Image (spheres, coloured by chain):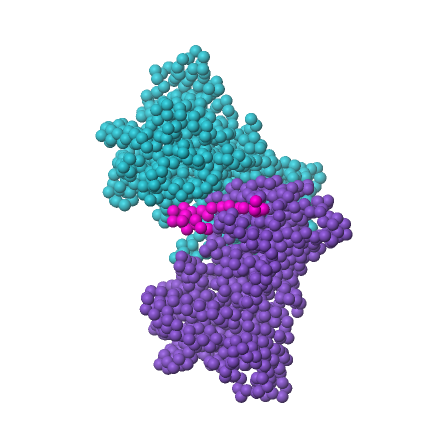
Chain colours: A purple, B cyan
Amino acid sequence: MTSFIDSGQRFRLTDPTLAPNAASYLWNRKMMIQLSARGYAVSQYMDPEPRKYAHVPTIAAQTFMQPEQDYFPHHPGRFFYIRDNETGDLFSAPYEPVRAKLDRFSFEPGVSDIRWVIEKDGVRVELRLDLPVDDVAEIWSVRITNLTDTKKSLSFVPFFPIGYSSWMNRGGHFDAALNTIVCTSVTPYQKVEQYFKNKGLKDITFFAADRTPDYFEVAQVAFEGEGGLHNPSALQDGGHLGGGDASYENPAGIMQWDLTLGAGASEDFRFLFGPAFDKAEIAALTERYIKGALEPVRQDYDNYIRSGLGSLELHSPDEDLDHFVNYWLPRQVFYHGDTHRLTTDPQTRNYLQDGLGMIFIAPEKTRTAILKTASQQFFTGKVPDGILLRPDTELKYINQIPHTDHAVWLVIATKAYIDETGDREILEEKIAWTDSNEEATLYEHVTRALRFLAGEVDDRNLPYIAQGDWCDPMNMVGYKGKGVSGWLAEASSYAMTTWADICRTENDSETADWLAQQAGKLNDSINRYLWDGAWYARGITDDGVAFGVQADKEGRIYLNTQSWAFLAGAADDAQKASMLQAIDDQLDTPYGATMFAPAYTAMRDDVGRVTQKWPGNGENGAVYNHAAAFYAASLYHIGEKERGFSVLSKMLTRPDAQDIKTRGQLPLYVPNYYRGAYYQYPRTAGRSSNLFNTGTASWYYRLVIEQLCGLRGDGEGVIIAPQPPADWETFRFTRIFRGATFEVRVDRDAEAETPTVTVDGRQLESNRLDRIETGKRYDVLVRLPK
Amino acid sequence: MTSFIDSGQRFRLTDPTLAPNAASYLWNRKMMIQLSARGYAVSQYMDPEPRKYAHVPTIAAQTFMQPEQDYFPHHPGRFFYIRDNETGDLFSAPYEPVRAKLDRFSFEPGVSDIRWVIEKDGVRVELRLDLPVDDVAEIWSVRITNLTDTKKSLSFVPFFPIGYSSWMNRGGHFDAALNTIVCTSVTPYQKVEQYFKNKGLKDITFFAADRTPDYFEVAQVAFEGEGGLHNPSALQDGGHLGGGDASYENPAGIMQWDLTLGAGASEDFRFLFGPAFDKAEIAALTERYIKGALEPVRQDYDNYIRSGLGSLELHSPDEDLDHFVNYWLPRQVFYHGDTHRLTTDPQTRNYLQDGLGMIFIAPEKTRTAILKTASQQFFTGKVPDGILLRPDTELKYINQIPHTDHAVWLVIATKAYIDETGDREILEEKIAWTDSNEEATLYEHVTRALRFLAGEVDDRNLPYIAQGDWCDPMNMVGYKGKGVSGWLAEASSYAMTTWADICRTENDSETADWLAQQAGKLNDSINRYLWDGAWYARGITDDGVAFGVQADKEGRIYLNTQSWAFLAGAADDAQKASMLQAIDDQLDTPYGATMFAPAYTAMRDDVGRVTQKWPGNGENGAVYNHAAAFYAASLYHIGEKERGFSVLSKMLTRPDAQDIKTRGQLPLYVPNYYRGAYYQYPRTAGRSSNLFNTGTASWYYRLVIEQLCGLRGDGEGVIIAPQPPADWETFRFTRIFRGATFEVRVDRDAEAETPTVTVDGRQLESNRLDRIETGKRYDVLVRLPK
């Protein structure tokens, strides 16, 4: 297995054509940017809703992030042309738009920056992008070095296209006092009230340099000419930029310097790019990030990122896994939990699961997410489809479609939070409801959510699906008000059992018994109406048709209804064996277990949107990693640790070069899906969505910590029960848990018949340590049978 | 003056780089396509709302047509690569995406087709686009000729990109039975009800050939590779297309034939491109337009277009003007009136003015438009903002913003229709109201519209502007309900005077007198509150501030409030002189009179949207041709015929090469604007919007016919009063009027002291012929003093 991991948490890709969409991302609480190895960029910031400051060259739809986004030469990006003034030869760093054959290319994203090293004809270009912690701005550092032993005359031309910002008004000019290209626009409005909303928007995009350019241009068309971006007319025949403005033309930040570099000499530049409200804001930002020292800014941002790198350090036989788990995975969890995916109305299930991941990083964030969710709950107990993070926002897109599963996640997040932190006090927090000022404890909120869920069932005691539940947009199964969800029946059962635990420790045996009874009733219904002979059906439509069953040609078996049956304890041993076999036979692929199979190839009116998605992508039979993570969780839950680890491994399968090419994916993050339909559409199976927004990250991290490493909270104590795969002879990890540090070493021992746990030299009677002392360091040795 | 006009109504552009956005357009009642000389295309069709079947490579916003649209290499287009298989040299016809230096380039749009002739290295490529009359489909004919006297081995590769059709589902495959690349997609939906709406959409785009391709490709990325569209990887090193499909990838219609052409030999191809619901529809369309004979299809379409070429044939000293007036101008009028700009909810003022133009082409269309408007009028008399052409559509975009001027256009259109046709019976047509089944005559409808208008005034008797009136989106002048419109006061006065004429001929002197009195009162108020000392103010804001006045630094003088003061008869001679001087000094530019000046450079909260548009473009101080046409009309109205003709001429100023370059405009149509702000932003002044949707065309045609040629209806008779510019020694025209043919010759006569009109050898006592005999041919000679 070839590793793409360099030392020091830095990945390296050395051929820009190998993985055309390979990208890394940086963010702070106000913005994010995804940069491809080739130089293309997707960036957005909060103003207060998500917005772009660099655009495609036409009017783009305002929409959510798209999977498998294609780039094209006029896509937004950050490009740096270098022309040899003697030969006229032109190349661009990092790779686009010239696409010259480079002597060296190295894309090197780190956890808190993105870097490249490019060499061509004796010139080295080093690029580095940093973000500040608190502002929306890209800080670009560029070093140009003459690698030869003779003098070089070069022209250096950064090119930052701004694109089509507004049909109403767009342009740009060079501001000499600021050394900045200021691109103005006016966000269009038609209704008067929109005008007042738009008034405060940052309608400027600026491109500032740390020195006066020798030449500049603002209208992209004047730069590009007939030559095109790969060979701009303005740079042909030793040309220099014309110094024009852009007037209702697509603007760009384009500057030019003629450099004379002696043998081995280099020159450094710094640029700043981002949105602004006015020139005063540009002046303030350039003061801070162009004139000010860069090192403290980098240090601050690195501190910010490292504050989110979690509470686990793994040292396993697999170095790549270690790197991923120690840096890139918690980084992805932190991004989700700290920024809420940079939306103002996260889906409730996302908000809670992103919050759940934070129990290992900043549990106070989890606490806030749980309490905020409860505060937007209805008095009936119903949990809303989305959580409004600002008073001036509203539910958008999919949050306008009624889904029925949100209560489940409130239970799961609250239980996970208490297990990790031991903070039972949260249950006593008093919170009002979105439609009532009457206050109730969180305990009551969650319990009432489950009571509401228990009431939304048909006469078979199966829960209505309405227009969808989690992760499969089957919006037409139950839109007439009759269809039911098999998955939600299982998830409800699991949530009730889970919450019954809490009720018991709260000494509320009445509620606990009621929940246990309800869970039992659900399991009965599940087995009575949904067991199809070899696996569980996904649901029953408005017209009474069970689907996800053997009789179906497409969508025959769904992963979620098997995984969650394991979690819900609905399946007996014979059923489990049958289900596992069916999963292996029908869902498993080299890229993981698909969410269902075969993928739908045509619309099923009684299933809905999922069947209209492209077969094998998105939710139509793809390897949906969030579902795969729950499959892994359910496998650990029933003691299938080898299978569980195998599922986790496949999500990270280190692709070989060929795989990179087809998957466009470096393992900097778990993407939300890989294309499925492996048997139907083999050419494209395994492709990555290239989207890093996914609840997968939280669950992956949790499984590594609580199942693979096996150190998890249990009331006042902690359970230490590592479950390494059979081929790990030994491994160790450090875990911060409730303020104590656990140094755990796990060894195989040919002598051991059962696992033993030794803490600070003293062997425990079980795998449970009853009390933990804050600030203490525990030295733990676990011996496992071979 | 260099003419770009070829013989036979065909324009010719011989350098693709001269006018980067030069384009022509074809349409039928279901679709339209605008094709640039370089090969880029914007096309849309009704399904039933306007929709595209070829897309940009990202998710585009669904929006109205944009002015000064920029093209870029991945913009939709229709391209044909030719590779010399011996040398490997590649070029593409018509010009993009390779942009090779061609030996010959000729873009030759005709009134009913679009053609090119391209030559490069001994190969000629002739392209021709035809449309059918009744279907949505592009029929492409291609002839490839070896111009040398040795055999040539060529590869011919048409490339029709489809772009990003849907995030939900997109792909494509080659259907061998149909010789067609079938690109499928599913229009996204989130709400269930949208699904049922989308179900009938034509989600397929197909590209069919008249023979089996030797090779094909469907995924654009596979074709393009690292080479890029200007040098596709698939065509490098003698390569052939790989025969793949597109699976959640942007598809394209790409086929390849290897041709061996003897000396002088040629080969013909035919292709069909467009949307379809299913393969059965593709089969039907290919049967009709690929397998069927092409000549009758071309003939039918040519007949359709020629049926709209109007009722005037001009032979003036200016051949270019003749061509424009005889072919391209009525063609543009016909497009508007026959298709209603391919929208389902035209703005009422557009709908009526487009209808008005049809009085010279197909007056039954005007009749329908007038009656349909009346049928959607409110019982109060209020005329709605937009007209719904289908029961299943709704008012969109700007039609949701309350404007106050629509009644004016109902009067003007009805009067023009009756003057041209003599069809007074239309006044007796009984029509209900949109909110009442009670029927009333059209006469009552129009009268009531004016009564409503007369009531919507403040205590100065000036009409409220609400959120806007015609052609200046000053949506914040009166949004609080107090601001008034100077232009609308004048337009109301003019409309009332106009309608009073009709009332008198209907012997309704009571209404006529009331209207005359109202018009007089309005003129009094106009002079009392809006005369600023040298010209008329544009209006008074909610807060009582007059604007468009000498005290203003920006938006100091508005053209419309001067033109319409002339039409309304509000200005005395001294005022007129002062206004004309102010227009000459402040509004006139080489590209025409700007709508106001100076253009706003910053927002005025009390004016609104117009001030946020780009200075000099759109409605912010541009040469808005529709307003310029009314300026011309008002000049003829007050007897300023030389000025009037000068205004018309400037709208068509034949640009020299330099001008084409900056204006991107061939005179195939009057665009809706040229950029203004001539003194503020000289670099971009004069640029064309490149949009052919504009009420200008109707008015231009009407002014040519009724003022320049001067032959216009008057009750039962016709007035013959040509007003040629002073430097026309002689001219002649043929005009069909109420079924009679007028052959008119106009001569300057040094002897004549006053104009004389001789009809069939008999000199009239005045310039009026009292009765017209249908079917008769009148031989008219007009003698004008020198």
Image position, residue A534 (x, y; %): 48, 76
Q: Can residue B717 be seen in this view?
A: yes
- Residue that extends furthest to the left in the rendered view of this protein: B510
Q: In this view, does B347 lie to the left or right of A85?
A: left
At a point 33% along the width and 65% down the height, the residue shown is A435
On the image, which quarter does residue A116 sit in? bottom right
User: Is residue A765 positioned above or below B156 on the image?
Assistant: below
At a point 54% along the width and 46% down the height, the residue shown is A182
Image position, residue A518 (x, y; %): 38, 78
- Residue that extends furthest to the top in the rendered view of this protein: B751
Magenta highlight range: A177-201
Q: Is residue A233 magenta?
A: no
Q: How many marks?
A: 0
Of the pair B381 and A234, the residue shown nearer to us: A234
Image position, residue A584 (x, y; %): 55, 73
User: Is residue A534 positioned above or below B560 on the image?
Assistant: below
| Quadrant of the image containing the C terminus of chain A | bottom right
Q: Can residue B99 be seen in this view?
A: no
Of the pair A327 and A16, the residue shown nearer to us: A327
| Quadrant of the image containing the N terminus of chain A | bottom right
At a point 26% along the width and 42% down the height, the residue shown is B379
Image position, residue A391 (x, y; %): 40, 59
Q: Is residue B569 left or right of residue B651?
A: left
User: Is residue B227 positioned above or below A502 on the image?
Assistant: above
Q: Is residue A188 magenta?
A: yes
At a point 63% along the width and 79% down the height, the residue shown is A730
